[in-house]
Amino acid sequence: MKTALMKAIELILNGSLELNNILSVTARMSLSSSVIALLIGVPIGIWLGSCRFPGRTPLLVSFRTLMGLPPVVCGLLFYMLFSGVGPLRHLKLLFTVTGMIVAQVVLITPIVVCNMETYVSSIAHDVRETARGLGLGTAKTFLLLANECGYQIVSAYLLAFSRAIAEVGAVSMVGGAISWKTMVMTTAIMQYTNRGDFTLAVALGIILLSLSLIVNVTISLLQRRLSR
Amino acid sequence: MKKIIALLLALTMVFALCACGTKTEAPAEEPAEEVVEEAAPVEEVAEEPAAPAVDTVILKEADDKMINNYSLIAVNAEAPFVDADGNAVADVAVNTAGADALIQWLLTQDAIDMAANHGFEQYGEYLFYAKEDAPVYAGEIAAATEETKVIRLSTTTSVNDSGLLAYLLPAFESEYGYTVEIQSAGTGKAIAAAKAGNADLIFVHSKSQEEAFVEGGFGRVVDGFEAERITFLYNFYVLCGPTADPAGVKDAASVLDAFAAIAEGKYSFISRGDKSGTHTKEISLWPEDLGITAEAESFVDYTEWYVSANTGMGACLVMAEEMGAYILTDKATFLTFYANGGVIG
C-alpha cells in the first residue's frame, strides 16, 4: 500500500497527459452537471418550501424518492434511451460527456430540491411575516427569501458537486468509460484496478478524496458562519 | 466581499493541508516552506523499486484445448435491430465506412506484424500470434471524412487491458484521421452492445457467440474479404493458481484432468461468470457430470469453491490473487497484470 501511495504522489506531482485528460473530463462533467442541477433545483426547492398548493406533498415525496434513485438504474434508463436502437438515438448522446451530464442532472437535482426545501420551509414563515410588515409584493417576497438562502445555496451546490464527482454507476453506463473521451476519475479507478495497475488507481483515489475533503471543509466553514 | 475572501482562505488552507499530508486539526497558518521540506523525502521513497509480489502463476498452458482465437466482425447497418420491446428499428446509425477502414487496416501485413510483436519487448513473451490462414489486405483504405471519422469499437477486456489497441491504433488514427472509441466489456456484453446499435465493429473471442451473431444477420462482409467473421489473431488461455498448487494442476496430464482435480478437491476457482469468451471457454473445460453452465442455478451446489465473480478479467485476477484461487485467463491479460504488480504493494 505504501509503495503504491508514494508512486501515486509522484505521479500527481509529475502529471501525465492521461491523468490531465481524466481530470478535465471529470471537472467538465461534475461542474456542469452540478451547476445545471442547482439552476433547476434551487427554484423548485424554494417554491416547494415556501408555497402551499394542492399536489405539493406528492411532488415533494416523489423528489424525496428520487433522491434514492440508484445511479445504475438511472444509467440503465439513459443507456436504453440513448442506445442505437433506443427512442432518443437521433440525439447521439450515448458515450458522450453531454449524455453523462444529463444522467447526472437527473440524479442530483432531487438532492438539491430536498435540501433547499428543508431549509426554506424552516425560514419561510418568518420571512413572510417580515415581508407583510414591510408591505412587499409576491415577487419581492420571493427575492427576499432567495436572498436569505444564499449560504444554503452554496451548501447545496457543494453537496451536488461532491455527489457528481463521486458518482460511478451512471457515468460508466452512459459514458462507456472511453479513454480520452468519457473516462472520469471513478471509472478510471475501476479500469486501472481491473488491469492490476493500482498505481494510477490509487493516485486518482487520492485526488478524488482530496477534492472531497476540500468540498467538505468548505461546507463546514460555511455552515459555521451560517449559524452565527 | 468578506464572505468570498473567507471562502478563498479556506480553500488555500485545505490545499496547504493536503500537500503537507497533516491532519485537519493542525494549525492552518503553516509557512509554505514547510510544505516543500516535507515533500522532499516523499519523492525519495517513491524511487525504491517495488518488487512484484504476485503469488498467482501460470500452471498449465499451450494445451491444444486452450487456443484462444480473436475475430473481427463489422456490424451490418441493415441488421434486424430491435428495441427493448422487440419492435424493429430501421434507421440505426452504423459507421460502415469507418468499420471497413479499421478492419482493412488491421489486416494489412504491417498491422498484423505489429500485433504479433506486441508486448515482446516488455514481457519477453508474445502476447498474440498471427493466424497463418488469416486474410491479408493489400488494397486501398479510405481516409476519414467528417461523417465517418468516429469509429465505435466494442471489444473484450482481454484485448483492451493487454494494451494491444493502445499500441496499434495511434498509427491507424494518425495516418487516416479516424478516432477509435473503445468500449471494453466481456464478449457477451460487447456483442450485446453491437446488437443494440452501439458499435460499428466488434473484436471478440468466442466462436459460438460470434457465429450466432453472424447467423442473426448482424455481421457484414467487408470489401476485400470473403466472410463476415475474420479470425486473425490467437493466443492461449492459461490456467493459473497459487504457487503452492494444492490441486497438483501442474502435473495433470491434460487441462481437462487439471479442471477435474480442482473440482475433485474443491479448491477455490474464480469464474468470470459474465458470458465472456473466457467464461465460455472455462465452462467447456469442467467435467461434464458437474453440469456447470453460464446459468446461476447450475453451480448452486458448488458455491463453497466455485466463485462466479461476474466481472472483468483483471478484477478476477485480483480476486484469485487475494483468495489463492485457481483461475482461467488469457495469457495476454495475465502477463500485463503480472507486469503491473497485480497486487497492492
Image (cartoon, coloured by chain):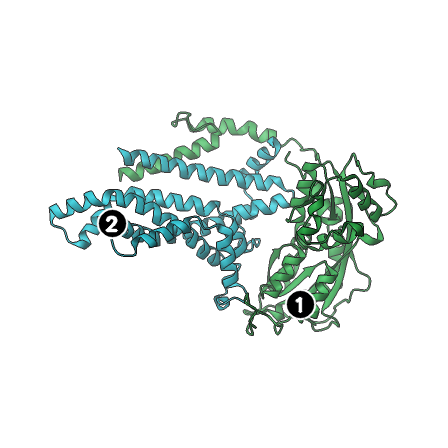
Chain colours: A cyan, B green
Q: Which residue is mark 2?
A: A50
Relative image position of residue A174 (x, y in whole percent): 52, 56
Check contact, mark 1 vs mark 2: CB within 8 A.
no
Residue B296, horizontal then vertical, whole percent: 66, 51
Disc 1 versus disc 2: nearer the observer: 2
Residue A187 picture location, percent across and down: 55, 48
**Secondary structure of residue under mark 2:** helix
Report the disc number at residue B74: 1
Same-subunit check for callouts 1 and 2:
no
Quarter of the image where the C terminus of chain A is located = top left
Give coordinates of residue B287: x percent, y percent: 80, 50
Q: Quadrant of the N terminus of chain A?
A: top right
Looking at the rendered structure, the kind of residue marked 1 is Ala
Left or right: residue B167 versus residue A218 is right
**What residue appears at the point 30 percent right and 40 percent down from the top-left corner?**
B4
Relative to residue B47, is residue B72 depicted above or below?
A: below
